[in-house]
Amino acid sequence: MSAADVTEAAARFADVIQPSPLQRNERLSQRHDLDVWLKREDLNTVRSYKGRGAYNLIASLSEEERSRGVVCASAGNHGQGVAFACAALGVSARVYLPRTTPRQKRDRVARFGGQYVQIVVEGETYDDCAAAAREHAEHTGAVLIPAFDDPRTIAGQGTVVKEIIEQLGRVPDVVVVPVGGGGLLAGTLTWLRETHPEVRVIGAEPQGAASMARALAEGRPVPLEHVDPFVDGAAVRQVGRHTFAVAAQQRPRLVAVPEGRICVEMLDLYQSDGIIAEPAGALASAALVADLGLPAGATVVCILSGGNNDVSRYNEIVERALVFEGRKHYFLVEFPQEPGALRRFLDDILGPDDDITLFEYVKRNNRETGPALVGVELGAPENLEPMLKRMDAAPHRIEQVSPDSPLFTFLV
């Protein structure tokens, strides 16, 4: 694959997929002392860059291949891209989605595809769906449309960075790319290697699904033992063979971004910038807090890869952000079963800016005491140490629930 393939892909869908905006972001520029721009792939028709690779691949199929129909696996965005392309080109498709795919993404796949698309919900992760899609292709002869591991998909996704340089009118110092299976990263590296090799590329992976870093460390694509599915658009257990080959050759800097940090950035994008980003969409700009070794004033373009976020997820996003920032904590408190016990706890333990957000008795099998699960939201992270000292001096038996505890997974 070469930069010429990226150029051909851009020409192939020039009349179908319009360039997404490139916008300077004042908040991020001031916060990090950089010249930060956001490539707004969330404003595409399918609200992500995935339509580029899907359309490029399907449009390049022969008439005989199109007549057999296509099949794909997707965490949601690739499925929308395939559905969009199939409806535009009149090709039948079967789209496999994991059960963790937000309802909003399922509905949009159906809406874009209309009569041309059949949706099948199967498995817990993208990789479960990928196995089902491959099996369907083998049994029926349908053409498999990979979300990232095909040179035609990679070339289509590489058009994002081509647009960035055309829109910016100059070469940026750094491009920060969200990384799941590695298609966008490979396309970016391929285009820049031949056209602007001086541009530094940084890949941002979710900490709970850093599959490209694992592959580069092992020298080959290998499956992760555990994947945190929260960043659903980038939660890939194993990167692709083609995408790994490009990354292994060029060795971009990779940054693992904690899921909580991604949630903080999602909320900042929404509250400060009016941007609705999905978790994978906030990956690149969230990575700027890492020590990237960038000089002051450097021009950095972050690819905001998607905006397909289900509004029902915002409670979890806020919760994860508060925990990450050190403002939300949980405790098991043993209360005496007598009037005024809770009032004394509030008076003795909480600071003036702190608040109880959860109070739930765990069990009441003792007439004298009853353990309760208590959630506390602090006015500021630095309020924690004074509160813990007050807890030590209190008559209650109190145990903090660590974020590493299995119990915590039921809370957040």
Image: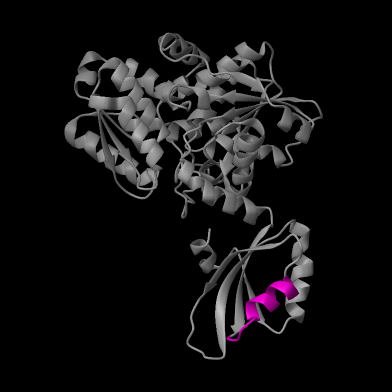
Residue at image position (51%, 67%) is: 406
- Residue 136 rendering spot, x and y as whole percentages: 22, 37
Q: Is residue 60 visible?
A: no
Nearer to us in this view, 352 or 387 = 352
Residue at image position (49%, 46%) is: 313
Q: Is residue 171 above or below residue 223?
A: above
Image quadrant of residue 133? top left
Q: Is residue 92 left or right of residue 44?
A: left
Q: Is residue 7 magenta?
A: no
Image quadrant of residue 329? bottom right
Image quadrant of residue 284? top right
Q: Is residue 336 above or below residue 400?
A: below
Q: Is residue 140 left or right of residue 105?
A: left
Q: Is residue 394 visible?
A: yes
Residue at image position (77%, 67%) is: 385
Q: Main secondary structure of the magenta part?
A: helix
Q: Is residue 101 above or below residue 412?
A: above
- Residue 175 rendering spot, x and y as whole percentages: 64, 26
Q: Among all residues in the image, which is located at the extreme front?
A: 339
Q: Is residue 343 left or right of residue 9?
A: right
Q: Among all residues in the image, which is located at the extreme left?
A: 140
Nearer to us in this view, 318 or 177 = 318
- Residue 265 rendering spot, x and y as whole percentages: 63, 40
Colour option used? one colour
- Residue 146 rendering spot, x and y as whole percentages: 37, 31
The count of marks equals 0
Which residues, given as a range, are shown in magenta? 337-349
Q: Among all residues in the image, which is located at the extreme right?
A: 296
Q: Is residue 343 above or below residue 366?
A: above
